Image (spheres, coloured by chain):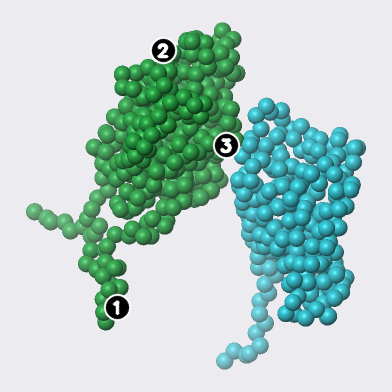
């Protein structure tokens, strides 16, 4: 159980694929103009991660290490194709909005990184859980980035959520402020770089704050070392 | 009599940062006055808004960073950045444009990189590019010069236009943009760019009313404004606030590029004089490219830096998407500054140059 806790902590925060490993930046920066796009791509990536991690873990003992990378890529490509076809079938507008970045999930280094670094060495259950957590960590950053850029750019939140979640989600749209001239920089990729930098900075600040908190706690716990040798 | 021995360094600082910045601000005044004369009170209002935003932002961020904000505010660098940005913005642009721009310049481009002396990019120009990319409509609404405009406007008109988009009499920005002949007017650079793409020749284009000045090819307003900034720039040179290397090499590079191309085909490529005195070349050469923080620091490097900016300006003006290019050129070369500085390190006194050293090594 402790292993699973550690995996969640690693995937969601300490070793977050987007914030710490800085993997998969290309889709991260290109498609997160709105929350919906971010969430859609994040969920797609998560599905692929779980699938590829599980499969890689199943076959880990039969894959010769010399040709493991091509095999991993083929497995990932198969899952990406599945996800792509699913999105094409059920969320067609979102599929069109995300465009080339769905097939490009194949090249997302976070996925092959987890297959190589974790799934090829661990059991099925742990690998699948690792895929889930890494995917959720990635999705969380995508959604946060999408929210920042959507808010700055268009002044709204959850615009087009119905493309992903069905018609009821139209009512989710929140207009924070009305604007006739969208803040294009936030919507264009340079804005994604800036927002990404701010999020990473925020994480570093939180980390150093937590370190201080923990350090203060451990200091309190320091006990006087018992004298084991006699004086004189 | 007592002789006091002071320890080194024996060279004293002639001016502190605040004095330098104040001199540069002083040198901007002729240009700003002429700009106000030609484009109305909007320029002054923009400067006021920008300066207030810059000072407030600088103080707030320095307080957040737990720095001594009083000392940093006294160096006037934020005020200068604000002024440079404000004069590049169309005078009747909505108030939030200049506020967002100045905030971006001070907070993101300057303070997040570590404050004055650490910023890689020129804050005013980075903010200008950010605004131009983000709000293309608001950022290109230059008014025609006063003597060519159909409607005159006073201080209250300007104030109201900046804050509401309409003048006191209720003229919209689009109406205020109308020239005497009832046609919306573009800036000189824009006019030439558009009409050349429509198949007119350069000599036909400069017959337009916006080029109604003594020397052919000079915009009515922009040539005078350039002259104002030129006077300020020469004053800065005389006061030794800036070195001659960057402005000279930049203007020379642009002049030579334009000369060559206009000799090749004078119908398609505007003359050198047109390029030098329209748009923001003069203020760019003397006030923007010479920013001591983000420009090259060696003399040889400064010449390369300036010349490259001149070439970039020409390339972007002639074949790029935007009519003017100072901001883009300066930002591109800001990125190259570490490399330029690395390769143009001057020889330290008493040391042989690196080239000779390698030669000696090869011999031995």
- Mark 3 vs mark 1: give the one in front: 1
Between the residue at mark 3 and the residue at mark 2, the CA separation in whole angstroms equals: 30 Å
Query: On the image, which quarter does residue A204 sit in?
Result: bottom right
* Labels 3 & 1 near each other (Cβ < 8 A): no
Q: Is residue A73 left or right of residue A168?
A: left
Tag 1 secondary structure = helix
Residue B18: give x, y in percent of width and height.
36, 40
Between the residue at mark 1 and the residue at mark 2, the CA separation in whole angstroms equals: 70 Å
Tag 3 secondary structure = helix
Q: Quadrant of the N terminus of chain A?
A: bottom right
Relative to B52, residue A27 above or below: below
Chain letter behind tag 2: B
Q: Where is mark 2, residue-wise? A: B147
Q: Residues within 10 Å of mark 1 (few under 14, many from 20)?
A: few
Query: On the image, which quarter does residue B361 sit in?
Result: bottom left
Q: Where is mark 1, residue-wise? A: B362
Check residue B133 in the rendering and tell me which mark sits there, or answer none.
3
Task: Say which chain is cyan.
Answer: A
Residue B68: give x, y in percent of width and height.
46, 46
The residue closer to the viewer here, A213 or B194, is: B194
Q: Which residue is located at x 63 percent, y 59 percent?
A: A208
The residue closer to the viewer here, B354 or B184, is: B184
Between the residue at mark 3 and the residue at mark 1, the CA separation in whole angstroms equals: 52 Å
């Amino acid at each position: 159980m402790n292993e699973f806790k550690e995996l969640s902590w690693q995937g969601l925060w300490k070793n977050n694929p987007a914030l710490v490993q800085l993997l998969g930046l290309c889709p991260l920066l290109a498609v997160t103009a709105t929350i919906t796009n971010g969430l859609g791509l994040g969920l797609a990536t998560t599905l692929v991660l779980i699938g590829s991690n599980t499969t890689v873990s199943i076959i880990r003992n039969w894959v010769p290490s010399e040709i493991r990378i091509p095999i991993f890529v083929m497995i990932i490509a198969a899952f990406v194709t599945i996800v792509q076809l699913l999105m094409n079938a059920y969320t067609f507008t979102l599929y069109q909005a995300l465009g080339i970045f769905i097939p490009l999930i194949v090249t997302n280094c976070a996925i092959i990184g987890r297959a190589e670094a974790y799934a090829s060495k661990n059991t099925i259950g742990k690998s699948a859980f690792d895929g889930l957590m890494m995917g959720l960590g990635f999705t969380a950053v995508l959604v946060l980035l999408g929210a920042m850029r959507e808010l700055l750019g268009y002044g709204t939140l959850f615009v087009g959520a119905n493309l992903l979640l069905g018609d009821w989600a139209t009512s989710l749209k929140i207009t924070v402020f009305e604007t006739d001239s969208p803040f294009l920089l936030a919507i264009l990729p340079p804005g994604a770089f800036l927002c990404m930098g701010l999020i990473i900075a925020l994480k570093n600040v939180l980390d150093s704050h937590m370190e201080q908190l923990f350090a203060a706690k451990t200091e309190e716990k320091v006990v006087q070392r018992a004298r084991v040798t006699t004086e004189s | 009599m007592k002789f006091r021995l002071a320890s080194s360094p024996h060279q004293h600082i002639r001016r502190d940062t605040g004095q330098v910045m104040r001199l540069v601000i002083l040198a901007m005044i002729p240009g700003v006055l002429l700009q106000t004369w030609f484009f109305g009170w909007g320029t002054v209002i923009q400067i006021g808004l920008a300066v207030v935003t810059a000072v407030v932002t600088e103080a707030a961020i320095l307080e957040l960073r737990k720095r001594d904000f009083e000392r940093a505010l006294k160096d006037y660098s934020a005020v200068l950045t604000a002024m440079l940005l404000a004069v590049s913005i169309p005078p009747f642009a909505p108030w939030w444009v200049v506020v967002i721009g100045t905030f971006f310049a001070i907070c993101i481009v300057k303070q997040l990189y570590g404050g004055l002396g650490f910023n890689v990019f020129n804050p005013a120009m980075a903010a200008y590019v950010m605004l131009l990319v983000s709000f293309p409509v608001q950022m290109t609404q230059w008014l025609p010069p006063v003597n060519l405009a159909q409607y005159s406007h006073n201080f209250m008109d300007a104030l109201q236009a900046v804050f509401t988009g309409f003048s006191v009499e209720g003229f919209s920005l689009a109406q205020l943009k109308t020239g005497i002949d009832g046609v919306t007017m573009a800036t000189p650079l824009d006019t030439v760019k558009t009409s050349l793409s429509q198949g007119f020749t350069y000599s036909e284009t400069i017959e337009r009313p916006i080029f109604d000045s003594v020397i052919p090819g000079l915009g009515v307003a922009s040539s005078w404004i350039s002259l104002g900034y030129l006077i300020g720039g020469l004053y800065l040179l005389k006061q030794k606030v800036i070195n001659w290397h960057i402005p000279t090499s930049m203007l020379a590079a642009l002049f030579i590029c334009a000369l060559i191309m206009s000799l090749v085909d004078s119908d398609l490529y505007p003359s050198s004089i047109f390029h030098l005195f329209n748009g923001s070349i003069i203020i760019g050469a003397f006030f923007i490219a010479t920013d001591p923080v983000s420009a090259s620091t060696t003399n040889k490097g400064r010449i390369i830096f300036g010349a490259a900016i001149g070439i970039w300006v020409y390339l972007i003006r002639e074949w790029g998407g935007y009519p003017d290019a100072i901001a883009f050129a300066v930002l591109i070369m800001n990125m190259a500054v570490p490399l330029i500085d690395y390769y143009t390190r001057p020889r330290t006194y008493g040391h042989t140059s690196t080239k000779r050293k390698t030669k000696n090594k090869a011999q031995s």
